[in-house]
Image: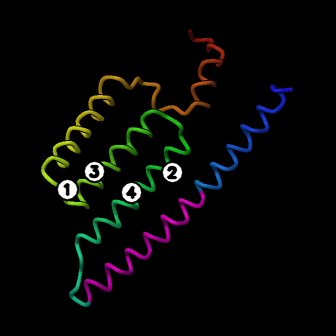
Amino acid sequence: MKHKLIPPLLKAAWVLEVVVGIAILVATVIQLVLVGNQTFSGLLSGQFDLDGFFTSIMTIVVGIEFLKMLILHTPRAVTDVLLFAIAKQLVVSHPSSMDTLLGVAAVVLIFLVKKFLHTDDDHLSAADRHMAAHAKPSEDE
């Protein structure tokens, strides 16, 4: 009985992930249009706010990376989201010296993880890894 429930639950979770992904994509595109409009009008009126621009753009970038993480389910996608979220915090919030130091240390740690702990297969999604593991060897091998 328990095993019969798992596939429908996994499918429902996948569908919900797709719905959330679509919502993130729509919100990100709307925000991008609004930022473009706000930037253009700010430039024309001479009241352009660079800090506000960076805040909005970094939020859009984090949203895009989060969407990629939902789609790909890879360790690289997760570390990319963390990297951009920390970078956004460093660029936008103008933290104290200690917060900046901790943020830079976190970025360095993420780069070390990407360099030394990720494998060549980390860019593949779980489905791609499953298919590669069960692929028949070619005749050339």
Quadrant in the picture for the C terminus: top right
First of labels 4, 1 by sequence position? 4
In the image, residue 71 lies at what x, y percent?
56, 44
First of labels 3, 2 by sequence position? 2
Mark 1: secondary structure: loop
Q: Is residue 13 above or below residue 49?
A: above
Q: Give me the disc on residue 67.
A: 2
Q: Give me the disc on residue 61.
A: 4
- The residue identified by callout 1 is 95
Residue 131: quarter of image: top right
Query: Is 136 a magenta residue?
Result: no
Question: Which residues fall within the magenta stretch?
Answer: 22-44
- Residue found at the very far left of the displayed protein: 97
Whether pointer 4 and pointer 2 mark residues with C-beta atoms closer than 8 Å, the reply is no
Q: Nearer the viewer, mark 1 or mark 2?
A: 1
Q: Nearer the viewer, mark 4 or mark 1?
A: 1
Q: Give me the disc on residue 87.
A: 3
Residue type marked 3: Ala
Mark 4: secondary structure: helix
Crowding at dot 4, Cα within 10 Å, few <14 / some 14-19 / many 20+, comes out as some
How far apart marks 1 and 3 lie (CA) works out to 12 Å
